[in-house]
Amino acid sequence: MNPKSKKNVGIYCRVSTLDQEKGLKSQEKSLKDYCDNHDFSNLVWYKDKVTGSTTDRPAFNKLKQDIFNGKVDTVICWKLDRLSRSLKDGITILTDWLDKNVRVIATAQQLDFSGAVGQLIASVLFAIAAMERENLRENTKRGMAAAKAKGVKLGKRPKLFAKDIVPLLQSGLSIGEVAIKLNKTRQAIYNALRRENSNLIYNKF
């Protein structure tokens, strides 16, 4: 298929709820560079900030609708598991698209899925993603069980408040130094200040 197709090229990005902005921008840059280097045009971006297993993905649903309506004939994503980390759903999605002669490219994996061979490769990759996800769940369960057996209280991390941060900033510490001292991320420090409207103090640092 000619990269300069008259139809649109759908660029799909999906990040989880953790570190969304950084992850999304990283995917966008990687995908844009790929399209520039391979002379793709008529790009249409579809961006979701959700988990891979959720059914509520408005941008992805729009992409599927555009494919169904014949508006998109190429889909480019960063990795195949951006489409779905569910083995069954992922294979169903890809098979349906390939049956419609939609070209699917996963840039980070340097794979171009088309025909029977493409479907076979995709099914293996989806299976690996599903296995990794299940292993993570099992490891988390084992870790929680071991911690509980040792008497460790499980639950959410204690909430961070501006009153914990402001005195440290006023003492001359930077945001980064405060984050290290409180064993938090810089983003957690920013979020706590914004949440409690500590704008005047926040802006000084």
Image (cartoon, grey):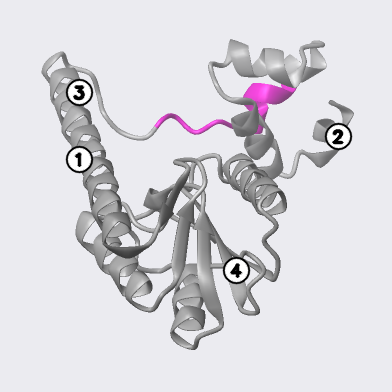
Q: Measuring 63% from the left and 73% from the top, which residue is drawn there?
A: 5
| Boundaries of the magenta span | 157-167
Q: Secondary structure at mark 2?
A: helix
Q: Is residue 112 left or right of residue 134?
A: right
Looking at the image, tell me whether mark 1 or mark 3 is earlier in sequence order: 1
Q: Which residue is mark 2?
A: 203
Q: Verify CB contact (< 8 Å) between mark 2 and mark 1.
A: no
How far apart, in angstroms, are the residues tagged by discs 2 and 4? Answer: 42 Å
Do the numbered discs 1 and 4 sit on residues whose CB atoms are within 8 Å? Answer: no
Q: Which one is earlier in the sequence, the residue at label 3 or at label 4? A: 4
Task: Check if mark 1's residue and mark 3's residue have beta carbons within 8 Å.
Answer: no
The residue carrying pointer 4 sits among few (fewer than 14), some (14 to 19) or many (20 or more) residues within 10 Å by Cα, namely many
Question: Residue furthest toward the front?
Answer: 2
| Residue bearing the label numbered 1 | 131
Q: Position of residue 66 (x, y in %)?
A: 51, 81
Q: Nearer the viewer, residue 3 or 108?
A: 3
Residue at mark 1 to residue at mark 4: CA–CA distance: 30 Å
Residue 11 x, y percent position in the rendering: 58, 62
- Residue 166 magenta-highlighted: yes
Q: Report the amino acid beneath label 2.
A: Asn
Foreground mark, 2 or 1, reads 1
Q: Earlier in the sequence, mark 1 or mark 4?
A: 4
Q: Amino acid at mark 1?
A: Met
| Distance in Å between CA atoms under marks 1 and 3 | 18 Å
Pointer 3 or 2: first along the chain: 3
**Residue nearest the viewer, comparing 52 with 100:** 100
Disc 3 residue type (three-letter): Gly
Q: Which circle marks residue 9 in the picture?
A: 4
